[in-house]
Image (tube, grey):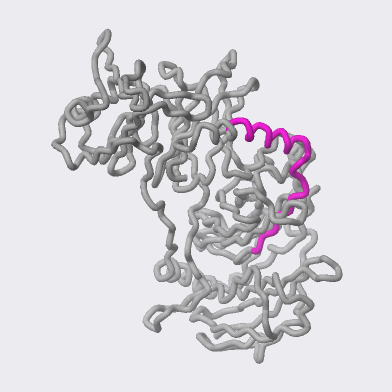
Amino acid sequence: MKNRLCISIGTFIVAYWILPQLICMAQQAQIRNERVQVFVSDRHLVTGEDLWLDINVFLNEAPSPVKVVYAEILDREGTSVSQQLIGVSKGHARGFLPVPENLDTDNYLLRVYTRSSPYTSGETGVYHDIIAVINPESAPNPNAPLPDKQLIPKPSSLLSVDKKQYSTQEKVALKIENIPVRENVRLAVRHTIPIQGEKMDIDWADVYTEKDWEAKQAIPEIYGHVIKGRTVSTPIDTAEVFYLTAHGASSHLFITKPNEQGQLLFETGAFRHYDYVVVQSGKSQDQVNFVLDSPFWPAVPRESFRLPRLVVDPAHKERIKERILAKSVNQYFIPKSYNPPQDFASVINPDRSYLLDDYNRFDDIATVIREYVPHVLIRKQNRKTLFRTYNKPHENMFKNNPLLLIDAMPVFDADAFAELNPKNIKRLDLLTRYFFYEKETFEGVISLTSFENDFGKFDLPKSALFIEYKGIQVPVENDFTRPPSTARKPDFRNILIWEPSLSPKNDSISFTTSQLSGEYQINLSFLHPDTQVWENHILNFSVK
């Protein structure tokens, strides 16, 4: 995304026209037959753990070009308790859903989908599963219904181990016999919490009504995340320019105009490292009349659909305590390693840059510019501050204010910009030429970058909207199945193997148990080449 705004004007004009056409194509059934498959790390979790997801998205049985999937956990009332946008590359995604610490002990509904798949692909476009969550401070809901149909998995004839009970940190030899495929095999070895009621069939027609997936304006996110909103001004002014600035570990600016229905679509690309957005209108004197739409599917399971009751046997209290201890140990010794942004990139390719620490600092930005930036003139007219930048290609001065930015956020109040104390500003970038973005043209740009990416303590404009909006999940490095590299670190892994796409070269796979005792389950699944049906095979063993 670096220097996104400095792509040539032709690129932006193409992007401006392509997005509406893509949406129109989706409405005309050009994007159909999406299929979402998910391999979960575990179906038994304690609060505070992460539910890892390996996701494949297919379009007409080929890897889908979409760039984002949506994952969420719903409670039995249909309220989403954890949500994430996860980036997709060549039809594959890997990410996680945090399980909040304050969740009650209960069963929860997991669903994963793309922005358009609920509307264009129905049941195959939305993956569902039931996740059991244990909170040591909460008892299960005694009023929840018992399932009227429950799946009881049968032991597999394809899997075998040399014994049924192992010691902690002992090597296990797993044999896989007579498997009909040698690629795209899913294999997991997980610690299980002794609970009942989390397995049942999920019938799409039992969960949703037709209005939940009826044809709507689907947004095919094949170039990245699209932020959707709408103006509530009447009448709708299709010439009104809206500015959306995304902020977090980095900052970026996006611009669009409403269509005749008042809808606004911001094409944001790889929308990562962001925590909130600031929305402003080019009519800067007015409070922006803007509503931000959630990108998640709004459908709520119908009242007749009830998650089964989660039954926890009190006799297994100590085993659950061990799992909770393991969670705390793993969080400390196996922390997540996030990939930070490479730098705090400017939204422009500047003609000149000034690191303010290289100069004497003054009390306001206007004085800094007057003293050190010869390509900008500042003057007063009717008691208002005017900035005029040099037009380098034409060797004259522009006649109107340039685009004024602080950490990518437009500032329409030139007086406030001029009066900003520069002590928290790291860099001043200057563009001395026309700047084109979408169909907008600006007479140069003056862009300030703060040390802390906090607008340099500049007050948020009163006419702006400040909205929390998480970006696409930042990729995380966390090999939670690997034993510690040294014996000095405790080993309380609750997942010993998690291989979403295994290609077994032989019939034997070995792994080592951890220090976490209890019951474990080996889960092997694959798409049978003859029946084209996913088969699931399990084998249980214990560690003491």
What residue is at 60 percent from the left and 49 percent from the top?
A: 67
For residue 159, which quarter of the picture?
Answer: bottom right
Camera-side residue: 393 or 437?
Answer: 393
x and y percentages locating residue 405 in the rendered image: 36, 31
Judge whether residue 83 can be spotted in this image. Answer: no
- At 53% across and 58% down in the image, what residue appears? 138
Which residue appears at 55% of the width and 18% of the height? 239
Residue that extends furthest to the left in the rendered view of this protein: 360
**444 part of magenta stretch:** no
Instruction: Note whether 343 is above or below 37 in the view shown.
Output: above
Residue extent of the magenta highlight:
16-39
Q: Is residue 458 left or right of residue 324?
A: left
Task: Give x and y (percent) for residue 461.
Answer: 37, 25
Q: Residue 25 versus residue 459: which sits nearer the camera?
A: 25
Can residue 348 be seen from the camera position used here? Answer: yes
Q: Position of residue 406 (x, y in %)?
A: 34, 33
| Front residue of this view, candidates 110 and 367 | 367
- Based on the displayed image, in which of its 4 quarters is residue 533 positioned? bottom right
Residue placed at 70% from the left, 72% from the top?
185
Nearer to me, 424 or 300: 424
Name the quadrant containing residue 141: bottom right
Q: Is the C terminus in the top left, top right, bottom left or bottom right quadrant?
A: bottom right
Q: Is residue 19 magenta?
A: yes
Query: Which residue occupies the extreme front position in the image?
Result: 394
Taking 88 as reference, is 398 left or right? left
Give the side of residue 466 with respect to residue 218, left or right.
left
* Residue 435 image point, x, y percent: 43, 28
